[in-house]
Image: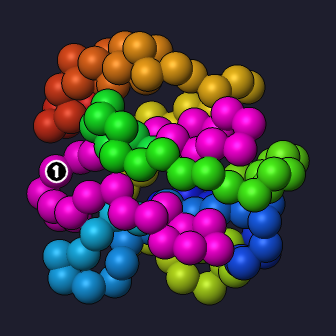
Amino acid sequence: SVIAVNDVGGDSDSFQIMTSGSSPGVWQLYHNRTYDFGQVSASEWVHFVVAKDGDKLMQYMDGILVGNITIPNGSIDEIDLYKFGVNRAGNTHWSGLIDEVQVWTQALNSSEITLVTLSLRSIDLNSEDL
């Protein structure tokens, strides 16, 4: 997993962003069910956003809405722990790079997510300074 929220897999207060494990694989959001973001390309940076607003989880990949999920009422209400580079259980580690992590206290709307994505695209990700 690239990022996991909370540390108990399968409970209603956790989710993780991960790859499917196949080659080349699919980027996925896992919260008691699997929801695809899109295909993995090992040679390209991708930008993920998961926004929660009430009982909705919105998945964005590179600024494009790819999933709009209804979750049970009361799910993911209290986020106590963010884990980077490891799954919720702590037994599978990410072997790639993670950059530009941002956590917001409220759900961003689609216009705000587009602005964040565009600002990240202006950064030269191939720069030796990164």
Residue 55, image quadrant = top right
Q: Position of residue 73 (x, y in %)?
A: 81, 51
Left or right: where does residue 128 sit relative to residue 7? Answer: left
Residue 63, image quadrant = top left
- Please say which color scheme the image uses: rainbow
Amino acid type indicated by mark 1: Glu
Q: Position of residue 129 (x, y in %)?
A: 26, 31
Q: Camera-side residue: 55 or 104?
A: 55
Residue that appears at 26% across and 58% down: 38
Residue that appears at 57% across and 37% down: 51
Q: Position of residue 9 (x, y in %)?
A: 71, 77
Is disc 1 placed on a helix, strand or loop?
A: loop
Residue that appears at 28% across and 18% down: 118
Q: Camera-side residue: 71 or 107?
A: 71
Q: Mark 1 sits on what residue?
A: 44
Circle 1 packing at 10 Å, graded few (<14), some (14-19), many (20+), is: few
Q: Is residue 6 visible?
A: no
Residue 75 belongs to magenta span: no
**Magenta range:** 29-58
Left or right: where does residue 103 sit relative to residue 75? Answer: left
